[in-house]
Image (cartoon, helix red, strand yellow):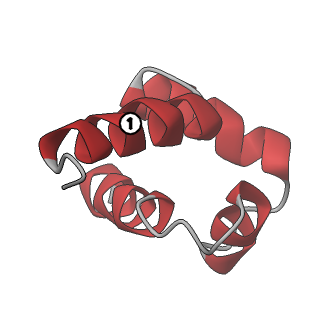
Amino acid sequence: MHKQMKSAIINKLANENATVSEVAYSLNFSSLSQFTRFCKKNLGCTPTEWRKVNLLREDADFPEA
């Protein structure tokens, strides 16, 4: 279960159009704090930190012309 949820979280966080709150509630977390705790335990960081690091890394992979 946690593996599927972790994958769903990563996919949704990679979508820049959804806020962290929208991601949390779309995955049926009852609160943002519950979602944040789950992410810290299973991703090793908060959802905002994950998004910041991974989206920056993605930008570095595709330099602008």
* Viewer-proximal residue among 27 and 61: 61
In the displayed structure, would residue 42 be above or below residue 16? above
Name the residue at 17% across, 51% down. 62
Image-based side of 27 in relation to 62, left or right:
right
Residue at 78%, 61% in the rendered image: 21
Quadrant in the rendering for residue 22: bottom right
Q: Position of residue 23 (x, y in %)?
A: 63, 67
Residue 36, image quadrant: top right
Work out which quarter of the rendered image holds the N terminus and state it. bottom left
Disc 1 is placed on an element classified as: helix
The answer to which of 7 and 2 lies nearer the viewer is: 7
Residue at point 81%, 49% (across, down): 32
Residue 47 image offset from top left, x and y in percent? 58, 40
Residue matched to label 1? 56
Please rate how many residues cluster around mark 1, counting C-alpha atoms within 10 Å: few if below 14, some from 14 to 19, many from 20: few
Q: In this image, 48 relative to 25: left or right?
A: left
Image quadrant holding the C terminus, namely bottom left
Q: Residue 50, image x and y in percent?
A: 47, 35
**Camera-side residue: 38 or 13?**
13
Apparent side of residue 59 relative to residue 62 in the rendered image (left or right): right
Q: Position of residue 55 (x, y in %)?
A: 39, 45
Amino acid type of the residue that numbered disc 1 sits on in the rendered structure:
Leu
Horizontal relation, residue 17 to residue 22: left or right: left
Tally the marks.
1
